[in-house]
Amino acid sequence: MFTHNGMQVNIRENSWIARLVALKLRKNCCAIFIGSTIRLLNSLKMRFFGIQLDFVMNCHIRQWKRKGYAFFWFHYLLLSLKYGYHQNPSEKEERNAEGDTRI
């Protein structure tokens, strides 16, 4: 557990939820944020304590605040079903915002 921008964050390694997501994405590793828990599969914990984690968390937190937590996940899942993970507008926003210092 660690604190990020005043929020307690838990890390679960070898998560069964991350395993399901990885199977769906046809990947051998995965990180998924659900609430204040990061669920990892086949990933070194320390790899996610750097800038990449900070950037991804800030981007998704900004999306949650903008849409509301429950609606964000409902909308995210609908968009993922419609467009797939890589074309999901929430994920595209995250990738397009790389280097944005406002996040």
Image (tube, rainbow, N blue to C red):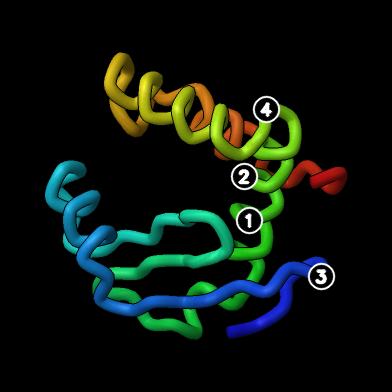
Dots 1, 4 in contact, CB < 8 A:
no
Residue 8 left/right relative to 39 = right
Give the image location of residue 60, x and y in percent: 62, 45
Mark 4 → mark 2, Cα distance in angstroms: 11 Å
| Residue highlighted by disc 1 | 57
Q: CA distance from mark 1 to mark 3?
A: 13 Å
Q: Which mark is residue 6?
A: 3
Residue 63 x, y percent position in the rendering:
66, 35
Q: Earlier in the sequence, mark 1 or mark 4?
A: 1
Which residue lies at the image location 37% right of the left edge and 29% below the top edge?
Answer: 77
- Indicate the amino acid at tag 1: Met
Q: Secondary structure at mark 1?
A: helix
- State the CA–CA distance, disc 2 to disc 3: 15 Å
Q: Earlier in the sequence, mark 3 or mark 4?
A: 3
Q: Is residue 96 left or right of residue 31?
A: right
Question: Residue 53 placed where, x, y %?
Answer: 59, 64
Could you tell which of marks 4 and 2 lies nearer the N-terminus?
2
Residue 59 against residue 79 in the figure, above or below = below
Circle on res. 67: 4
Is there a contact, CB below 8 Å, between mark 1 and mark 2?
Answer: yes
- Residue sitting at 37 percent across and 20 percent down? 78
